[in-house]
Amino acid sequence: MPEFRTIAAVAAALTIGATAPAVAQDRTEFRVAWSIYVGWMPWGYLEDSGIMDKWAEKYGIDVEIVQINDYVESINQYTAGAFDGVSATNMDTLSIPAGGGVDTTALIVGDFSDGNDAVILKGDGELADLAGKPVNLVELSVSHYLLARALDSVGLREADLASVINTSDADMIAAFATPDVEAVVTWNPLVSTILEDPNAKSVFDSSDIPGEIIDLMVVNTETLEANPDFGKALVGAWYEVMGLMAAGDEDVLTAMAEASGTDLAGYQAQLASTQMFYDPADAVAFTQSAELPATMINVAEFLFDKGILGVGAPSADFVGIAYPDGSVTGDEGNVQFRFDTTYMQMAADGAL
């Protein structure tokens, strides 16, 4: 995965989010941003293939799908109002647009990491042996979150480590090869490459916290409420592509693989450690599960602990997060992040 998993520049995003233009109006033209990642490659394909145009035409609208090479910048631009939707993780959605006061809805819950992210130790040992060791990772990223969850599982805290060393994802493979690096936390395809080293051992990965690192398509809530056809077109196009992927269409998968800089086998390997929700009914069930609020509480606590849950956030409950059953975690008076299954349920019911 490219550097999309980092949440640097959060302060800038929060600042611009406060001045995002009003968008609650009846419209026919919309823009959505996305970034390269195994679970988001369908956005590029549905744009290039004409599937998005087909669904937009069905609802009498126009939807432009724009690839942004810098993931954080794509979220910043969405937060500022330049886009109506953006591909983002649950953590980054909470910290940047929602934390910055931009009411945002998770329209599509596309997948969760199921082994793509890993804690890797050099040499023999187990997870508890991280105590007293330096750990290299991209700070304030989902790798940092994964490390926190890993340490908690064995009764350790970050303070029990020798240090956490901020290391660019571009430098991670080379860093692991140096004698003074004892452990790293990173994501695929870097994980697969590092684990080719016979001295590398994965001691914890995202399959140990299934459903916590979630990849979404989020949209501006006011825009969606004023323009439900926008939601219908996006969801309809998405699940048409999901059907092709689920059927194993090699032409479709190869196109996605090449667009992401790998081959079919490489892309399929990444899909193997990604829990894709090809069936909208599965995405609905996941989003309605009792586990999701518990996950988001963990994420909010992590963000607050790192000081990136909104400017001046007084507690981990600063941002309210609403769920399909109407329940809210965090501040009910400041709901800025919503998980809504309405449109995914339409897809499941064949009502689009």
Image: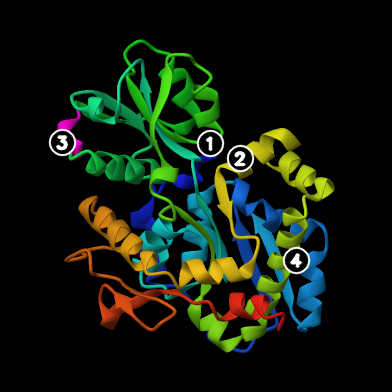
Crowd rating for badge 4 (residues with CA inside 10 Å; few <14, some 14–19, many 20+): some
Q: Is residue 108 visible?
A: no
Most foreground residue, 333 or 266: 266
3 and 2 marks in contact (CB < 8 Å): no
- Mark 3 touches mark 4? (CB < 8 Å): no
- Please tell me which of labels 3 and 1 falls first in the chain: 3
> Residue 172's x, y, as percent?
45, 26
Q: Indicate which disc, 3 or 4, sits on the residue closer to the N terminus.
A: 3
Residue 53's disc is: none
Alpha carbons under labels 3 and 4: distance apart? 47 Å
The reply to whether discs 3 and 1 touch (Cβ–Cβ < 8 Å) is no
Viewer-nearest of labels 3 and 2?
2
N-terminal of the pair, mark 2 or mark 1, is 1
Label 3: state its secondary structure.
helix
Q: Is residue 22 above or below residue 8?
A: below
* Disc 3 versus disc 4: nearer the observer: 4
Tag 2 residue? 270
Under mark 3, the amino acid is Ala
Q: Which residue is mark 1?
A: 188
**Circle 4 sits on which residue?**
240
Magenta range: 156-161
Asked where in the image residue 283 lies, by quadrant, the reply is: bottom right
